[in-house]
Image (cartoon, grey):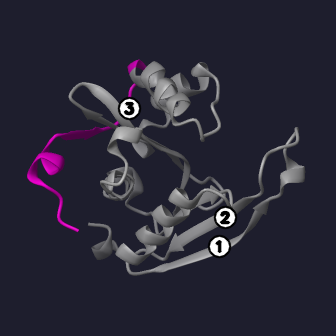
Amino acid sequence: MTLPTDIKTDYHFRKPTKEDGAAVWELIKGTNVLDLNSSYSYLMWCEIFSDTSIVVEREGDTVGFISGFINPNSPNALFIWQVAVNASERGRGLGTRMLRQLLNRRACEDVQYVEATVSPSNKPSKSLFKGLAKKLDTNCHISDYFTSEDFPSEGHEDELLFKIGPIEEENKR
């Protein structure tokens, strides 16, 4: 898919800082679909996990965010916790571009797998991760992970584990 020139050049991808915490919280809140955590958690996330997370700005506004970390139980896996794209930017491949930017960072040089949990009704996330596997020319294995009974209150869906990989170094770019 070829994007118009203005879409290719007007995004600014970078590591988040604690100063981004409030804007990230607002972005997540504005999705109306992602679990909204405390504003403190986003401040901490942007400060401590900045090497494996990404913020995207357009015209001075935060329009995209991915929180990720190297899984301590699988040091070759980048676990993606949340992917948020402002409604005005959806459908432009921004989620995939953020993931590929992350995979090319030094902090992810040993990453061979991308992992994420996705609820069955979250069609955009399912498409994002299946599409990433296709673009990286690798597998996307989906398995049960958390059941609705694992959550403290009723109403939360099951969470399926998406495991993309192995990822060849030359396919990260």
- In the rendered image, the residue lying farthest to the left is 5
Label 2: which secondary element: strand
Mark number displayed over residue 142: 1
The residue that disc 3 covers is 16
Asked if residue 102 can be seen in this view, the reply is yes
Asked if residue 168 can be seen in this view, the reply is no
Tell me residue 10's x, y (percent): 16, 40
Q: Give 34 or 52, whichever is nearer the viewer.
A: 34
**For the point 60% across and 40% down, which residue is it?**
34
N-terminal of the pair, mark 2 or mark 3, is 3
Q: Amino acid at mark 1?
A: Ile
Tell me residue 33's x, y (percent): 60, 41
N-terminal of the pair, mark 2 or mark 1, is 1
Q: Which segment did they paint magenta?
A: 1-19
The residue that disc 2 covers is 161
**Is residue 104 rendered magenta in the image?**
no
Q: Quadrant of the N terminus?
A: bottom left
Label 3: which secondary element: loop
Q: CA distance from mark 1 to mark 3?
A: 29 Å
N-terminal of the pair, mark 1 or mark 3, is 3
Q: Amino acid at mark 2?
A: Leu
Tell me residue 58's x, y (percent): 24, 34
Circles 2 and 1: CB atoms closer than 8 Å = yes
**For the point 55% across and 29% down, which residue is it?**
29
